[in-house]
Amino acid sequence: MDLGLRDRVAIVAASSQGLGKAVALALAREGAKLVICARTAERILAAAEEIRTATGVEVLARAMDVTHGDEVRGLVEETLKRFGRIDVCVTNAGGPPSKAFAETSVDDWTSAVNLNLMSTVYFARAVLPVMQKQRWGRFITITSVAVKQPIDGLILSNSVRSAVSGLVKSLANEYGRFNVLVNNVCPGYTRTGRLTELSTRLAASRGTTPEQIQGQWTDQIPLARLAEVEEFASVVAFLASERASYLTGTSIAVDGGLVRGVT
């Protein structure tokens, strides 16, 4: 299926590794021009070179912090100067630390809001007016399956990422008339560094091993395995495409059936 993404311009945040990098690579394989960012210059430049080598697309890579609104605005301005348009924006950020509620501080909550909610707000404020003027756009957030079914030990993520889901629904309602589609994609248990960190922390608190923790997770999943990052990225690429022209305001779980709810 031709997704109609050739020569579209896509920004993908937190894309030096894990889900963000997989999404960037999936869009590049469809012919999209890329703007990618992450905090560490060495990692994001390496990711850009890997994507260029694999796909031959044009990639602009910048080291920046998505919790700083001025840096987000600067990236969007540079994208417009370089490419003249922005068609797709995929917001993403590393999850807050895994903690129980009693272990969290007020500073933990502030940091989580800045990392996951405000970073999304900054991108939305910068790119949605551009997409509105174009009468075409795809604004996609990456959150977590925790917005549909809370995960033990992730009180910060469960709470703050759910706020992002509410933002997505509201933005979809406001910008749909301009053919700007806004959707949220919710990864389940996927083979990433974040998953390793969470299983290691839970194993230490429960006196078991990370492998046993991951085994307990897969036991809950009807497909009986963890997801690969490429499987998640394929869903995001579809939502970014011409083919997803009647999907907006959704939160799609890519979770192998983990969520037990009917919606």
Image (spheres, grey):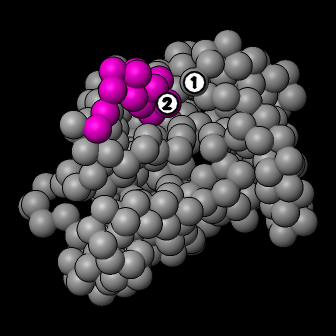
Which of the two discs, 1 and 2, labels the residue nearer the N terminus? 1
Left or right of 263, for residue 203? right
Image quadrant containing the N terminus: bottom right
Structural distance between the alpha carbons of marks 1 and 2: 6 Å
Q: Quadrant of the C terminus?
A: bottom left
- Residue 121 tag number: none
Q: Nearer the viewer, residue 80 or 196?
A: 196
Q: Quadrant of residue 74?
A: top right
Q: Residues within 10 Å of mark 1 (few under 14, many from 20)?
A: many
Q: Which residue is identified by label 1?
A: 67
Q: Is residue 132 visible?
A: no
Whether pointer 1 and pointer 2 mark residues with C-beta atoms closer than 8 Å, the reply is: yes
Q: Position of residue 187 (x, y in %)?
A: 39, 59
Mark 2 highlights which residue? 115
Mark 2 burial class by Cα count in 10 Å: few <14, some 14-19, many 20+: many
- Residue at the image position 62 percent from the left and 19 percent from the top: 68
In terms of image quadrants, where is residue 19? bottom right
The residue most toward the top is 70
Using the image as rendered, state which of residue 248 and residue 221 is in the foreground: 221
Question: Is 53 contained in the magenta span?
Answer: no
Mark 1 is on which residue type? Thr
Image: magenta residue range:
103-117
Identified at 38% across, 78% down, the residue is 209
Residue 99 is drawn in which quadrant? top left
The residue depicted at 33 percent of the width and 26 percent of the height is 105
Decide: is 258 above or below 101: below
Query: Helix or strand or loop: what does disc 2 sit on?
Result: helix
| Closer to us: 192 or 24 | 192
User: How many dots with numbers?
Assistant: 2
Residue 250 rendering spot, x and y as whole percentages: 30, 45
Residue 231 location (% of width, % of height): 50, 72
